[in-house]
Image (cartoon, grey):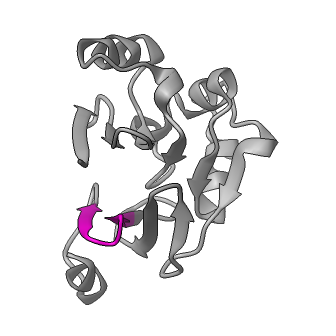
Amino acid sequence: MLNFISFGSGSSGNCYLLYTETDSLLIDAGVGVRVLKKHMRNYGLSLSSIHHILITHDHADHIKSVGNISSEYDIPVYATKKVHSGIKGNYSIKKKVPSHNIHSIDTNVPFVLGDFVITAFTVPHDSSDNVGYHIVYKNHVEFCIMTDIGYVTDEMKAFI
């Protein structure tokens, strides 16, 4: 069974969890670590159960805690090269993602993380790069997430 939880959506922080009994994806990490731990405990989960982090773009309300979480729990972070560069250069993010946890992805090139096949696609926004994610679980359940979209493009429609 595929489960989805929103821990925050808006200018105060964006963070989502997509998980199954055996695998999990944290999508964005824009809420504080203490807040995220509290929310996860409320669902009977812990940060140590997160296997992968996907980042949509490099604005602080999407990446606030990514370095802390990745460092403390040794979780790989997947984003485009431009987004990883934006995270490195963002002065408001004090703890950066450790180099061994930085994994660059390309738009429109599917990749596999555990039980998920993920395709990043371009989403219009005023960041250095912005992607949505189309996620397929066990070849039959599809999930699509986009944040901060300015308008709907033909590419987005195809994934929706």
Residue under the point 28% across and 60% down:
146
Q: Answer with the quarter of the image where residue 121 lies.
A: bottom left
Visible residue check, residue 8: no
Q: Residue 52: horizontal and vertical position, in percent?
A: 54, 44
Residue 75 in percent (x, y) is at 62, 36
Across and down, in percent, residue 138 comes to 36, 64
Above/below status of 103 relative to 26: below
Which residues are drawn in magenta?
132-145
The answer to which image quadrant residue 97 occupies is top right
| Residue at x 46% of width, y 59% of height | 127
Residue at x 35% of width, y 38% of height: 21
Query: Where, by quadrant of the figure, is residue 158 drawn?
Result: bottom left
Q: Is residue 69 visible?
A: yes
| Left or right, residue 5 beside residue 99 | left
Q: Is residue 78 above or below residue 27?
A: below
Quadrant occupied by the C terminus: bottom left
